[in-house]
């Protein structure tokens, strides 16, 4: 049932404000059968355009799209056998839930008891068996979104494409629907391409994430690979929060640790595998706020606290390295427990991290 999908040098050029530009610029991608792959990136980076080309709603200006090895680049959308769930899921308001879900089958000419069985199976899949006689306005936003999903699943698509399907829901429902969508996708073993600009959503749901930036792929990998070994500063900052400390790679020690110099101070950290810097060249040290602590270890730099944000369970200290020329403060997020000593602004503290928690990439 599940299919593979290949994008070969896919590009889409648009004319915007009388100028040509590449909304999608030479994307290569292999999606394996049953995989849940997410396109993640900021607004305008080309996520929707890529998805629309796969769906057949948009024609690539260059490149090929293959499904199970068969070229579908010129195949019309309705012959591709795909399901598409949009951000705006507009159900038919005058139709009962049952009829909303049955609609696609009807268009295909499927009717009667066999079609009804399929509709009920799809409703059961999204946990809405009892809602079949209700109208869309009698359902919550999350329930409506699940109907939208059932409406697509009932057609047994070979490939499921979803473009920000959760962005109209409130925060709590979004969390719930993440697990629901993932469960259904795994149960049906359906290949799924999912678009979001919410990194938490991408991290929790996906087998792999394709991080896009201005029409390019910045990095493609599992959520953990992206988090632990970002290829670029953009990915480091987009996936989770990251401090990007400028310096130089001084060398590599005999155990393979990178030696990162900030002025005279040398710190040990992992060398990025995706994009390792060259010795004696400019480099970036990536350390997450939650991995910085105040302690006098070997792997520490003195920093001055310039701001302090109390967040309840944590305190976010903004710190700078005096004289380093890096004016934008770094963030050090430390747990706050009752009785924790709070440090005042302007205090000079030793900020340290364990070498494993830092990664050095090209600057
Ligand atoms: N039909 C079109 N004509 C001209 N430019 C377009 C067209 N469709 C999209 N674009 C432009 O292409 C770029 C990519 O758009 P796209 O919709 O793929 O972005 P996105 O990553 O989905 O963003 P968002 O997160 O805001 O939905 C944007 O700069 C957009 O303005
Ligand atoms: Mg979009």
Image (cartoon, rainbow, N blue to C red):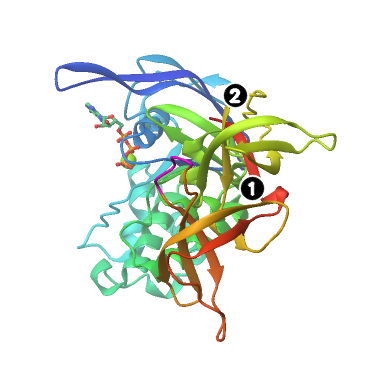
Q: Quadrant of residue 281?
A: top right
Residue 213 located within the stretch drawn in magenta: no
Q: In the rendered structure, which segment of residues is drawn in magenta? A: 324-328
For label 2, being within 8 Å of ligand 1 is answered no
Q: Is residue 8 above or below residue 177?
A: above
From the viewer's side, name the closer residue of 12 and 347: 347
Could you tell me if residue 123 is visible in this image? no
Whole-angstrom CA distance, mark 1 to mark 2, is 27 Å
Q: Residues within 10 Å of mark 1 (few under 14, many from 20)?
A: some
The chief SS type of the magenta part is loop
Q: Which mark is residue 357?
A: none
Q: Residue 67's x, y, as percent?
A: 54, 27
Q: Residue 153's x, y, as percent?
A: 47, 51
Residue beneath the point at 68% across and 61% down: 296
- Secondary structure beneath dot 1 equals helix
Q: Quadrant of residue 17?
A: top left
Which image quarter is the N terminus in? top right
- Residue indicated by mark 2: 281
Q: Is residue 288 left or right of residue 119?
A: right
Q: Residue 107's x, y, as percent?
A: 33, 44
Q: Is residue 146 above or below residue 24?
A: below
Q: Residue furthest left?
A: 18
Residue beneath the point at 36% across and 47% down: 104
- Residue indicated by mark 1: 224
């Amino acid at each position: 049932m599940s299919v593979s999908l290949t994008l070969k040098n896919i590009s889409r050029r648009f004319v915007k404000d009388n100028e040509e530009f590449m909304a999608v610029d030479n994307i290569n991608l292999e999606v394996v059968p049953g995989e849940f792959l997410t396109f993640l990136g900021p607004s305008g980076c080309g996520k929707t355009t890529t998805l629309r080309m796969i769906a057949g709603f948009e024609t690539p200006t260059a490149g090929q799209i293959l499904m199970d090895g068969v070229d579908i680049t010129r195949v019309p959308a309705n012959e591709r056998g795909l399901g598409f769930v949009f951000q705006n899921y507009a159900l038919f308001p005058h139709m009962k839930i049952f009829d909303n879900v049955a609609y696609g089958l009807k268009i295909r000419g499927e009717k009667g008891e066999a079609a009804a069985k399929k509709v009920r199976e799809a409703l059961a899949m999204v946990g809405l068996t009892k809602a079949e006689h209700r109208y869309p306005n009698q359902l919550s936003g999350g329930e409506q979104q699940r109907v939208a999903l059932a409406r697509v699943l009932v057609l047994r698509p070979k490939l499921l494409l979803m473009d920000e399907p959760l962005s109209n829901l409130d925060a709590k429902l979004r969390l719930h629907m993440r697990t629901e969508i993932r469960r259904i996708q795994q149960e049906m073993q359906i290949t799924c391409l999912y678009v979001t600009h919410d990194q938490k959503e991408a991290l929790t749901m996906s087998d792999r994430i394709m991080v896009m930036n201005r029409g390019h792929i910045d990095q493609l990998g599992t959520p953990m690979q992206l988090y632990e070994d970002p290829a670029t500063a953009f990915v480091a900052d987009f996936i989770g929060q990251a401090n990007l400390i400028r310096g130089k790679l001084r060398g590599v020690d005999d155990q393979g640790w990178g030696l990162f110099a900030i002025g005279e101070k040398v710190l040990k950290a992992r060398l990025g595998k995706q994009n390792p810097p060259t010795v004696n060249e400019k480099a970036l040290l990536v350390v997450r706020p939650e991995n910085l602590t105040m302690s006098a270890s070997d792997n520490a730099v003195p920093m001055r606290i310039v701001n302090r944000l109390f967040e309840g369970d944590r305190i976010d200290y903004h710190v700078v390295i005096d004289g380093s020329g890096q004016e934008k403060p770094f963030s050090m997020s430390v747990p706050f427990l009752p009785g924790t000593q709070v440090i005042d602004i302007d205090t000079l503290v030793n900020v340290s991290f364990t070498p494993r928690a830092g990664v050095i990439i090209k600057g």
